[in-house]
């Protein structure tokens, strides 16, 4: 056990794909504790254990029925695939996740791919699909994709989330394969269409929109920001070189390693958010939209190795390492500008889909979570304060207390 703990701590500091093995389906089973919506009983005035599901969640449940998705239909239910399905509807409109266990040294560290149905269509009338952070392909996933549309764009958003890009390029030769800046030089086995431009920013960020390849998707629909502020202190080069994305129609933020959200040990969906925010004196409403529900059930005790990886290795060790040592000193002002644009003024985020851990739902909760992660506070009482974030970064940032 001690040896495993040491290994977890080491990998949290290194966090590089050269140590990670291929995907495997999770073999252990968990009892599914599916929490369904409950309504208030006006007769006895009792308070339900779980508040009624929001309309969006009911629409997502209806989408699982349309696609004939059932719990445990693809793999056993666990924290890294809470529904055990080949794909899971995640946001409205047209956002789906491919949740998979990801094993390193027999430890499930979890990973998630996101599918976005774009507003554009192919010549035969199918919805174009954008794939973010590709996972391993298999026949069930390929079949599920055909029900959603045609794969036209595949994005590897940072240096780590690229392992299966070659599979998608081979399976979908007509799709455009995109990488983060500099990725094509590192992964020469992939037939790349191109890269997201260095320093990419969306229109409205406070500078001119970054010029990009006209073969790319519509940047007004899926907006990128390149996290061009980091340096590996051991090599002097970019570590993740991540590009994050915002899907405007669903108000969804997509991240890989800039933000993660590993669950606490009891397997309650987003239970750790309550604990973490309360340490900041923030109480989450009991009817928040991120608790366990039908498409994200409780899964029981998280395996020890996974728990150590997420709550010790990543949260306690890697997070301060990244924030204090990997963000360049001369770029911390720009990092704060990015953080405030994401959290406070530019993107109205209602869903956060991280590659690692639980999905976060609800506009207020998403803001609170990002404020805590970036150690900032939005001025939500003043429209002028919200609109002035482009001026942040001139003075010393407060991200790294």
Image (cartoon, rainbow, N blue to C red):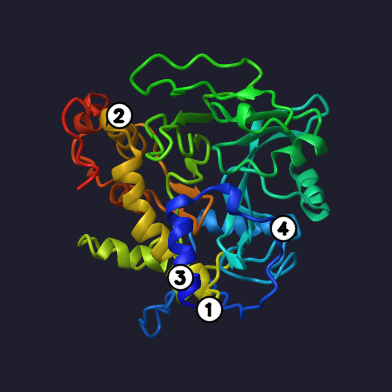
- For the residues labelled 3 and 2, the Cα–Cα distance comes to 33 Å
- For the residues labelled 1 and 4, the Cα–Cα distance comes to 21 Å
Estimate the x, y position of residue 273 in percent, counting from the top left.
36, 62
In primary-sequence order, the first of circles 3 and 4 is 3
Give the residue drawn at x 76%, y 52%: 141
What is the crowding at mark 4: few (fewer than 14 residues within 10 Å), some, or many (at least 20)?
many
Tell me whether circle 2 and circle 1 mark residues in contact (CB < 8 Å).
no
The residue beneath circle 4 is 86
Estimate the x, y position of residue 351 in percent, counting from the top left.
46, 48
Closer to viewer: mark 1 or mark 3: 3
- For the residues labelled 3 and 4, the Cα–Cα distance comes to 31 Å
Tell me whether circle 3 and circle 4 mark residues in contact (CB < 8 Å).
no
- For the residues labelled 1 and 3, the Cα–Cα distance comes to 21 Å
Tell me whether circle 4 and circle 2 mark residues in contact (CB < 8 Å).
no
What is the crowding at mark 2: few (fewer than 14 residues within 10 Å), some, or many (at least 20)?
some
The residue beneath circle 2 is 331
The residue beneath circle 3 is 5
In primary-sequence order, the first of circles 1 and 4 is 4
Q: What is the number of the mark on residue 300? A: 1
Element under disc 3: helix
Element under disc 1: loop
Estimate the x, y position of residue 120 in percent, counting from the top left.
68, 27
Element under disc 2: helix
Q: Is residue 320 above or below residue 195?
A: below
């Amino acid at each position: 056990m001690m040896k495993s703990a040491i290994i977890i701590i080491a990998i949290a500091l290194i966090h590089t794909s050269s140590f990670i093995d291929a995907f495997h389906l999770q073999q252990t089973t968990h009892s599914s504790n599916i929490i369904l919506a409950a309504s208030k009983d006006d007769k006895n005035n009792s308070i339900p254990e779980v508040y009624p599901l929001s309309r969006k969640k009911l629409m997502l449940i209806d989408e699982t029925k349309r696609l004939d998705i059932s719990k445990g239909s693809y793999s056993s239910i666990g924290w890294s695939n809470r529904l055990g399905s080949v794909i899971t509807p995640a946001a409205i409109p047209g956002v789906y996740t491919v949740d998979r266990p990801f094993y390193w040294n027999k430890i499930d560290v979890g990973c998630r791919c996101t599918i976005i149905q774009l507003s554009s269509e192919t010549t035969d009338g199918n919805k174009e699909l954008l794939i973010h952070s590709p996972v391993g392909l298999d026949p069930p996933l390929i079949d599920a994709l055909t029900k959603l549309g045609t794969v036209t764009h595949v994005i590897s958003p940072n240096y780590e989330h690229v392992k299966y890009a070659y599979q998608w390029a081979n399976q979908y030769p007509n799709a455009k394969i995109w990488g983060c800046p500099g990725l094509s030089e590192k992964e020469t086995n992939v037939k790349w269409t191109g890269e997201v431009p260095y320093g990419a920013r969306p229109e409205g960020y406070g500078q001119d929109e970054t010029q990009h390849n006209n073969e790319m998707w519509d940047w007004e629909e899926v907006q990128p920001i390149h996290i061009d502020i980091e340096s590996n202190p051991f090599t002097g080069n970019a570590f993740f070189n991540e590009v994050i994305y915002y899907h405007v129609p669903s108000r969804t933020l997509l991240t890989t390693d800039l933000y993660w959200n590993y669950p606490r040990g009891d397997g309650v969906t987003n239970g750790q958010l309550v604990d973490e925010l309360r340490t900041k004196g923030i109480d989450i409403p009991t009817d928040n939209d991120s608790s366990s529900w039908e498409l994200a059930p409780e899964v029981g005790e998280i395996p020890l190795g996974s728990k150590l990886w997420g709550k010790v290795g990543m949260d306690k060790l890697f997070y301060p390492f990244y924030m204090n040592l990997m963000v360049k000193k001369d770029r911390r002002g720009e990092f704060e500008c990015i953080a405030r644009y994401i959290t406070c003024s530019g993107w109205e985020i209602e869903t956060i889909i991280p590659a690692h851990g639980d999905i976060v739902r609800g506009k207020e909760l998403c803001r609170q979570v990002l404020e805590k992660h970036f150690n900032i506070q939005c001025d939500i009482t003043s429209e002028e304060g919200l609109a002035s974030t482009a001026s942040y970064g001139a003075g010393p940032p407060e991200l790294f207390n």
